[in-house]
Amino acid sequence: MIGTDELTWGETRDLVLSVAADPATALGADLAGWSYAASVPQIAQVLVSGAKLGRKGAKVIDKLMPWNLGSKRHRQHTAAEIARAQAQMDREVIFQ
């Protein structure tokens, strides 16, 4: 549980910041505005595959990159959705 000897607030903060900065995670990709999560080795593999196909392959591969496809976030959340999420957080996050 967060905020206990098992997982301190500092450790939780460090984990969240690490995940948020990593585009290979769903959270990191979303925060970066990418359409899907991808690691550097995965992107490199796609780029190499595209390069093997020549100029035409490079153009196709460029269109498939997560930063070119756009983010999955297309809509704003409603006030009711935000209120429900806030109420759930208030119930589940316990400060000790």
Image: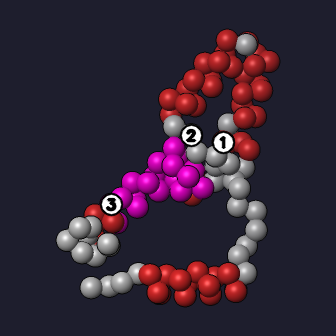
Magenta stretch encompasses residue 66: no
Q: Does label 1 or label 3 sit earlier along the sequence?
A: 3
Whether residues under marks 2 and 1 lie with C-beta atoms below 8 angstroms apart, the answer is yes
> Which quarter shows the C terminus?
bottom left
Q: Which mark is residue 66?
A: 1
Residue 33, image x and y in percent? 63, 53
For residue 48, what is the image quadrant?
top right
User: 91 and 14: which one is in front?
Assistant: 91
Q: Depth check: give the residue in front, 39 or 89.
A: 89
Q: Quadrant of residue 60?
A: top right
Instruction: Say which residue appears at 40% left-offset and 61% top-offset.
Output: 16
Category of crowding for the residue at label 1, using alpha-carbon neighbours closer than 10 angstroms: few (below 14), some (14–19), many (at least 20): some
Q: Nearer the viewer, residue 1 or 17?
A: 1
Q: Earlier in the sequence, mark 2 or mark 1?
A: 2
Q: Which residue is mark 3?
A: 14
Say which amino acid is labelled 3: Asp
As measured in the structure, the alpha-carbon distance from the residue carrying label 1 to the one carrying label 3 is 25 Å
Q: Quadrant of the N terminus?
A: bottom left
Whether 20 is among the magenta residues is yes
Secondary element type, mark 2: loop
In terms of image quadrants, where is residue 7? bottom left
Q: What x and y, as percent, mark residue 41?
A: 50, 29
Q: Which mark is residue 38?
A: 2
**In this picture, which residue range is highlighted in magenta?**
13-30
Residue 20: x and y in percent read 47, 56
The residue located at (33%, 66%) in the rendering is 12
| Measured Cα–Cα span from mark 2 to mark 3 | 21 Å
- Figure disc tally: 3
**Up-down: is 87 above or below 54?**
below
Left or right: 68 in relation to 19: right
The local secondary structure at tag 3 comes to helix
Q: Secondary structure at mark 1?
A: helix
